[in-house]
Amino acid sequence: MPLLVAPALSAGSLAAHEQPHLPVRPGLALRPWRDDDAPAVRAAFDCPAIQRWHVRRLDGGDEALAWTAQWARRWHDETAASWAVVDADDRPVGQIGLRGVLMSEASAQLSYWLVPVARGRGIATDALGALTRWSFTRAGLHRLALEHSTANAASCRVATRAGFAVEGVLRGSVRHADGWHDMHLHARLRTDA
């Protein structure tokens, strides 16, 4: 069945380029994941807060390596992208990424997490700002959205500080270990101030 409107972004618009390194602020950058990041990812997923809000864990080095390795393929397929948030010594202190990329709609969902030692310093907000700018100005996306449990006040602060307005509450939308959670839906459009 043919579409009656042209896709907002042509297939191949992302995959035609290498996944970029993005500066965030002095001593902080976003870069594609590498295989040698697997131990840092494994350690991050041992964090109870990351497990709680992302409802995942990694059970070994092979799973961590598979996690880091998936992102090159997903970039090429234009379905998702993930960046390591790295410090001045190029050590991963977090993750930020695009999920559910829809080239036809020029939209994506966002995800992010930080290891405990990196929290509370504005790193997630600044990383979210850097990825948002790139997504709107270079990648050509029109809409970015993110969801988090209404019980996750820290994630709500990050989204709000990065200019993502709350659009509503998705009732009983995601199941966590302690049951169903309502989710805040935040979003920004390229045309937002």
Image (tube, rainbow, N blue to C red):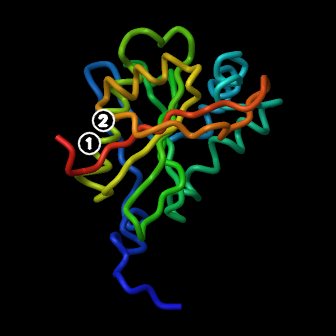
Q: Which mark is residue 133?
A: 1
Q: Which mark is residue 20?
A: none
Image location (x, y in percent) of residue 124: 41, 23
Are the residues at dot 1 and dot 2 in contact (C-beta closer than 8 Å)? yes
Residue 89 horizontal side relative to residue 116, left or right: left
The type of residue carrying mark 1 is Arg
- Residue nearer the viewer, 137 or 160: 160
Q: Please report the residue visible at 38 percent of the width from the left and 42 percent of the height from the top.
A: 187
Residue lying at the far right of the rendered structure: 59
Up-down: is 67 above or below 5? above
Q: Please report the residue visible at 77 percent of the width from the left and 28 percent of the height from the top.
A: 179
Q: Which residue is mark 2?
A: 130
Residue lying at the far bottom of the rendered structure: 1
- Residue nearer the viewer, 156 or 141: 156
Up-down: is 181 above or below 192? above
Label 1 vs label 2: CA separation? 5 Å
Q: Please report the residue visible at 57 percent of the width from the left and 50 percent of the height from the top.
A: 71
